[in-house]
């Protein structure tokens, strides 16, 4: 069986430091990450091509991080039936509330899971929980992670 794979998308290079905690979680869980910076507004065709080709690269879950209007998660969800987790990124303007509301207010039929503002670590853990349904190694790593957390 191929390694579990997640696509980690950002709308801007400036989001990289905010998604770094997700990469750390995935490394610990043995999950392969395909990381891309693609703007839903400035590069819609590149995004469409990436989302459509991602399953052939083994991608089973998308995480899309975006700030302000935060259209990236919703646009990704409109192009795939795979799970999409949105990470609202904080900004100087409204502190990330605009991004959070944009992500959680998706129309019926195009769901996007949402985590807290700058909650990339929880997005990764949620993606791992999804992958754990299929991959025993991820399930074991996730159980071990939770055990260590409970020990303080």
Image (cartoon, rainbow, N blue to C red):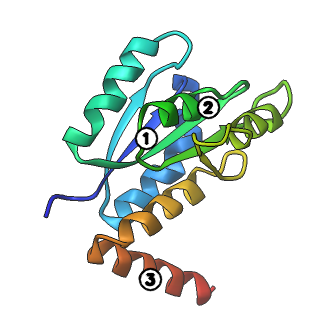
The answer to whether marks 2 and 1 mark residues whose Cβ atoms lie closer than 8 Å is no
Name the spot of residue 43 as percent of width and height, x first. Answer: 46, 12
Q: Quickly name the residue at label 3.
A: 143
Q: Which residue lies furthest to the right in this view?
A: 94
Q: Which quarter shows the N terminus? A: bottom left
For marks 3 and 1, the one nearer the N-term is 1
Query: Can you name the residue that lies furthest to the left here?
Result: 1
- Say which mark, if any, is on residue 128: none
Q: State the SS at label 2.
A: strand
According to the image, label 1 marks what residue?
8
Instruction: Answer with left or right where residue 92 lies relative to residue 139.
Output: right
Q: Earlier in the sequence, mark 3 or mark 2?
A: 2
Tag 3 secondary structure? helix
Q: Earlier in the sequence, mark 2 or mark 1?
A: 1
* Residue at horizontal 73 percent and vertical 25 percent from the top: 68
Residue to which mark 2 is pinned: 66
> Cα distance, mark 3 to mark 1?
23 Å
Q: In which quarter of the image is residue 3?
A: bottom left
Please report the residue visible at 58 percent of the width from the left and 33 percent of the height from the top: 74
Q: Element under label 1? A: strand
Residue drawn at (57%, 40%) of the image: 110
- Alpha-carbon distance for marks 2 and 1? 11 Å
Report crowding for label 2: few under 14, some 14 to 19, many 20 or more residues within 10 A (C-alpha): many
Question: Residue 24 at x, y = what percent?
Answer: 44, 56
Residue 14's spot in the image, x, y percent?
58, 26
């Amino acid at each position: 069986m191929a390694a579990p794979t997640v696509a980690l998308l950002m709308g801007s290079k400036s989001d990289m430091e905010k998604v770094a905690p997700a990469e750390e979680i995935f490394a610990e869980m043995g999950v392969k990450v395909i990381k891309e910076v693609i703007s839903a507004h400035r590069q819609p065709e590149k995004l469409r091509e990436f989302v459509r080709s991602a399953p052939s690269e083994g991608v089973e879950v998308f995480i899309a991080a975006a700030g302000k209007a935060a259209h990236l998660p919703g646009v990704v969800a409109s192009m795939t039936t795979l799970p999409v987790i949105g990470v609202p990124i904080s900004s100087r303007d409204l502190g990330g509330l605009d991004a959070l509301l944009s992500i959680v207010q998706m129309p019926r039929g195009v769901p996007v899971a949402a985590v807290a503002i700058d909650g990339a670590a929880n997005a990764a853990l949620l993606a791992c929980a999804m992958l754990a349904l299929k991959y025993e190694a991820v399930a074991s790593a996730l159980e071990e992670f939770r055990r260590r957390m409970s020990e303080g």
